[in-house]
Amino acid sequence: MKVMVGLSGGVDSAAAAYLLKEQGYEVAGATFRLLDDWDEAKDAKAVADYLGIPHYVFDFRDIFKKEVLDNFTEEYKQGRTPNPCVRCNKFIKFPAFFEKAQELGYDLISTGHYARTDGENIFRAKNLAKDQSYMMYNIDKELIPHLRFPLADLSKDEIREIAAKAGIPVAQKPDSQDICFIPDGDTQGYLERNIGEMPHGKFVDANGKCLGEHKGICRYTIGQRKGLGLSLPAPLYVGKIDPEANEVILVDNEALFKKRLIVKDFHWINGAPDMPIAVTCKIRYAHNPAPALASTYFYEDRALILFEEPQRAVTAGQSAVIYDGDKLLGGGVIIG
C-alpha cells in the first residue's frame, strides 16, 4: 500500500516515514511550504534521500495565509486567543494534504502526530503527555480511514532511539516549542508587526472602576497576571476582554473559575450522539480532561458543556474538545 508522509524536517515525522517503510508500505514524503521565508524542506529532503523515498513540496502559502495567519491576527484583534494548529489541521495538514496525495496516486497519508486511529475513530495517544488528538477534532469522518499514525504507542525517547539506530539525519534535532510561523516565540512582536499598534484602553475591575491603561487588547489573555504593568494592592487576573469597549476586565482568582461554557462551530466526528452525554473535556491543549456533560445548544453548530467542577481560565478562541474515555468525540471554539 502507498502512503505519503508529511515530512516537517523534525524527528517525529522522519520516524513515522521510517516505521511505515519498515512495515512494508510504499512511502513518499511531502513538505508543506507555508511561508515565503521558509527553509523546512532542507532537512525533510535529507530524510527522504536517506530513506530512499520520493519527496514532494506542496505550496500551501495562500490557504495558510487565509485560514491560519489572517484568522490568527483577527482573533487577537477581537480579544480572543486562537489555536492556529487546530485551524492548520482543519484546512491544510489533513484535507489539503490528502487531496494532493491522491492526485499523485497515494490513498493514505501519515504524519508524526501523537494520536491513534482504528480506521473509524481517533483516540488519545498512549503517550498522554504528547497526545495531539486535541487538535484533530475537526477532521472529517470520511478522511479517518486514510490516516496512519505510526507513533501512537511510542514515547519521545523511544522515537529518538529508533531514529538514532536507523541513522536518520535528524534523530537528535531539538523539538520545536513554538508556533511554526513565530519561531522566536514572540507572539506580541508578531502581532505588532502584522496588526500595528492597537489603541490603548482601560483596565477596569469587576465593578467598572478604572485601574489603569492597557496597551491594546491583543496583548492579553484570560488568566494572565504578569505583564499588566500595574501596581495593585492584591493579585488580579485578566477575566474578560471587551473589544467593543476596548476594556480589559481584571478579577480575583476565584472569579476565573467557570462550570459552563458555550462552543461554536461544533464538529462531531461520527455524528451527534443522544444528549446530554457524559464526557471529559479539555479547554486547552495542556488541560487535563475534566468530567462534564455536553449537549446541543440553541443553534445546530453550538454546544453547551457543563463541568462537574469549575474550570479555571476558560478562554474564548481556544477549543473545547470532548472525549469518551480516550475516544475523541468532537469539539468546537469557545465563545463564552
Image (spheres, rainbow, N blue to C red):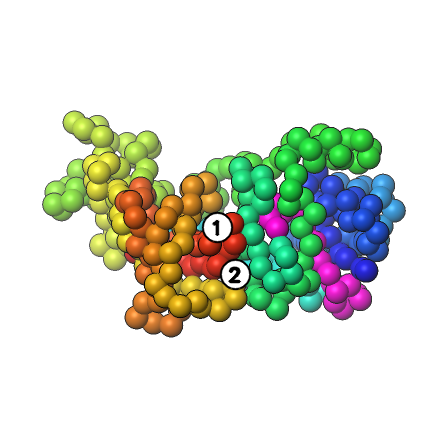
Amino acid type at circle 1 is Gly
Quadrant of the image containing the N terminus: bottom right
> In the visual, does 248 lie left or right of 333?
left
> In the visual, does 225 lie left or right of 267?
left
Residue 113 is a magenta residue: yes
* Secondary structure of the residue carrying numbered label 1: loop
In percent of the image, x 46 and y 54: which residue is there? 324
Q: Is residue 191 visible?
A: yes
**141 versus 30 height, above or below:** below
**Depth check, front residue: 247 or 101:** 101
User: Where residue 59 sits in the image (x, y, percent)?
Assistant: 69, 59
**264 versus 33 height, above or below:** below
In percent of the image, x 82 and y 35: which residue is there? 166
> In the visual, does 322 lie left or right of 206?
right
Q: Which residues are magenta?
A: 101-116
Q: Which mark is residue 138?
A: 2
Q: Is residue 195 visible?
A: no
In percent of the image, x 59 and y 42: which residue is there? 126
Q: Which mark is residue 325?
A: 1
